[in-house]
Image (cartoon, rainbow, N blue to C red):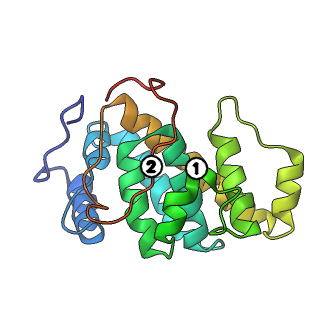
Amino acid sequence: MARIEPVPAGTRRPLIRLTFAMARRRFGGRVPEPMRVAARHPKIYRSYLGMEMGLDKASLVDDRIKELATIKAAAMTGCEFCIDIGSFFGQEHGVTEAQLLDLPRYQESPHFDEVERLVLDLAVGMTRTPVDVSDELIARLGEHFSDEQIVELCGAIAVEQYRARFNWALGIGSEGYAEGAVCARPEIPAGAVATA
């Protein structure tokens, strides 16, 4: 349960009602709790929706690759909601169960190719504090992706950081999107995160 009361699904505010209806279509009849909590502050909510819609329309990078990167970032931050929904959408876009299970050891796993490992290196570097992304890594990514595609990858990973930290701070946990399916595992050190 979130630490701040989510906006009720039947709210009278027109923009929020419209976006909740759109969310229900996309998320199997549910409005994700992070949306309902963010809707408490309409200006923040509009900004958040703008980021999400922009990323949703960005299509220079294969969705499967972006999902892989964001699931890795979610696993590293330990965000239950992000791991749950990311694992669900990742599998819809072609991320395999073996890849979800092998994310902690992606460097040695036979389930990832060279490009996927580079993208996961980017996710790891961007998720670390402080950020640890080298010129060499960007140059190596540039052998496989255009500048615009690298920007799209960085944007997707950065927005995942926003989601994860927002959800952790406000106590938003898993909602069962990946229930019954294989789900990525948190990769944070034991005791490193306050209880949600």
Amino acid type shown at disc 1: Pro
* Residue at screen point 70% across, 43% down: 125
Q: Callout 2: helix, strand or loop?
A: loop
* Residue at screen point 24% across, 62% down: 18
Residue 57 higher or lower than 133, as above or below? below
* Residue at screen point 58% across, 50% down: 104
Rendered image quadrant of residue 4: top left
Disc 1 + disc 2, Cβ < 8 Å: yes
Q: Callout 1: helix, strand or loop?
A: helix
Residues 38 and 69: in front is: 69
Amino acid type shown at disc 2: Arg
Q: Position of residue 172 (x, y in %)?
A: 30, 39
- Measure the alpha-carbon separation of dots 1 and 2: 8 Å
Q: Is residue 8 left or right of residue 50?
A: left
Q: Is residue 55 visible?
A: no
Q: Position of residue 42 (x, y in %)?
A: 32, 41
Q: Is residue 46 left or right of residue 132?
A: left
Disc on res. 52:
none
Residues 42 and 59: in front is: 59
* Residue at screen point 54% across, 65% down: 99
Residue annotated with mark 1: 104
Rendered image quadrant of residue 166: top left
Residue annotated with mark 2: 185
Q: Is disc 1 surrounded by few (<14), some (14 to 19) or many (20+) residues within 10 Å?
A: some
Q: Is residue 143 visible?
A: yes
Q: Is disc 2 surrounded by few (<14), some (14 to 19) or many (20+) residues within 10 Å?
A: many
Q: Which of the image's four quarters has the C terminus?
A: top left
